Image (tube, helix red, strand yellow):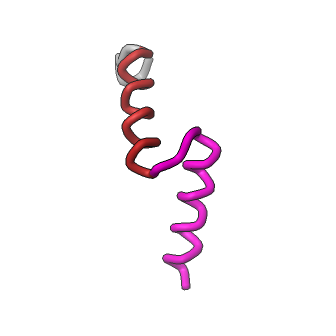
Amino acid sequence: MILSACTGTICKHVEHILAKLNVENRTAAAIVAIAALANAKK
């Protein structure tokens, strides 16, 4: 609602992000993000 974006548009963006990260779902994407942040702090 804040961005006035359609739900379908958001889902398509999420699909593209998941494909680029080579993961199947948002949970796996979050794990990838946490691992990247942990490596960046080293």
Count the labels in the image: 0
| Quadrant placement of the C terminus | bottom right
| Quadrant placement of the N terminus | top left
User: Which image quadrant is residue 8 in?
Assistant: top left
Looking at the image, residue 18 sits to the left or right of residue 35; the answer is left
Compared to residue 32, the image places residue 4 above or below, namely above
Residue at horizontal 46 percent and vertical 50 percent from the top:
22
Q: Does the magenta stretch include residue 38?
A: yes
- Residue 37 horizontal/vertical position (percent): 54, 68
Compared to residue 11, the image places residue 18 above or below, namely below
Residue at horizontal 35 percent and vertical 17 percent from the top:
4
Compared to residue 7, the image places residue 39 above or below, namely below
Q: Chief secondary structure of the magenta span?
A: helix
Residue at horizontal 44 percent and vertical 51 percent from the top:
21
- Residue 12 horizontal/vertical position (percent): 38, 26
Q: Nearer the viewer, residue 42 or 15?
A: 15
Residue at horizontal 54 percent and vertical 77 percent from the top:
39
Q: Which of 1 and 7 is in front in this view?
A: 7
Q: Is residue 28 magenta?
A: yes
In magenta, the rendered stretch is 22-42
- Residue 23 horizontal/vertical position (percent): 53, 47
- Residue 32 horizontal/vertical position (percent): 56, 58
Compared to residue 37, the image places residue 12 above or below, namely above
Q: Nearer the viewer, residue 35 or 6?
A: 35
